[in-house]
Amino acid sequence: MRAVGLLLLLLALCGSGAQGELQEAETTKTTAPDIWAEVRALRDMVVELKVELRNVQAAVTDSESQVEELKAELMVTNVYTRLSSSESRIDTLERENTERKVAFYTGLTNSGDVGPFTSSTTLKYIKVFTNVGDAYNPSTGFFTAPVRGVYYFQFTLCGYLTGWMGVQVYKNNQRIMYNLENKEGTGHEYMTNSVVLELMAGDEIHLVLPSSHSLYDNIYNHNTFSGSLLFTL
């Protein structure tokens, strides 16, 4: 009886062990596929991350290339801007330098007696020997100041007929000088004077022969009108 009991106990233990091994095998079978699925999922994530990383690297490289292109364009733009600014300054300096060179010297006429007239007449010195800056216009007899500055003007008069000889100097519409002399006989007689004036750009200077006055000129330039810019302001 005792032997039978031991035998039954042994069989029970063996049955219990076999059942545990069976359960453990089933658990292993259930767990193993889950682990491999996770490994495959992690591998897929790594692959996707590598692809995204390559895309990011490509985008960064493309952005760096665009940045370099923009830098190059900006440098070219700056160069052109500075070049244009330099050219503009050069043009301005050349124009100002040209405007600062002002000088003229003229003679009245080759036709002999000028006047007397019944009304005051603007004198047109038509023989132009020097006209640096083109500020004097022989068609009108007017000198026009190209820049603000201090100018020097000089005139020489010659009369031949008996009677009044003289000239009036006008700045725009303002008479600023009147030189005259009454000749008692015929023959050449001279008069010279000069004036220094501060002029604004656009101011005009011209000489006027008053009514009943006369002058005389020929190829020897007895009557002259000249001027120059002393300095700018």
Image: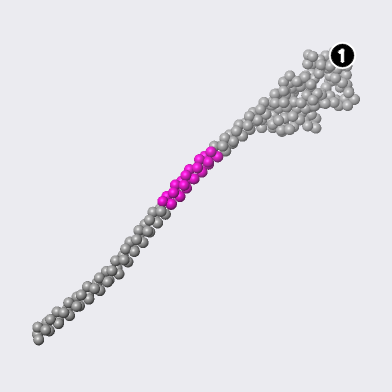
Magenta-colored span:
54-78
Quadrant, the C terminus: top right
- Image spot of residue 148 (x, y percent): 69, 32
On the rendered structure, is 152 left or right of 108?
Answer: left
Q: Is residue 177 above or below residue 33?
A: above
Q: Quadrant of residue 141?
A: top right
Q: Is residue 4 magenta?
A: no
| Residue 177 seen in render | no
On the rendered structure, is 134 left or right of 7?
Answer: right
Q: Measuring 88% from the left and 23% from the top, which residue is drawn there?
A: 117
Q: Residues within 10 Å of mark 1 (few under 14, many from 20)?
A: few
Q: Which residue corresponds to mark 1?
A: 186
- Image spot of residue 162 (x, y percent): 88, 16
Q: Measuring 35% from the left and 58% from the top, which residue is drawn there?
A: 43
On the rendered structure, is 106 left or right of 211?
Answer: left
Dominant secondary-structure state across the stretch colored magenta = helix
- Image spot of residue 155 (x, y percent): 76, 21
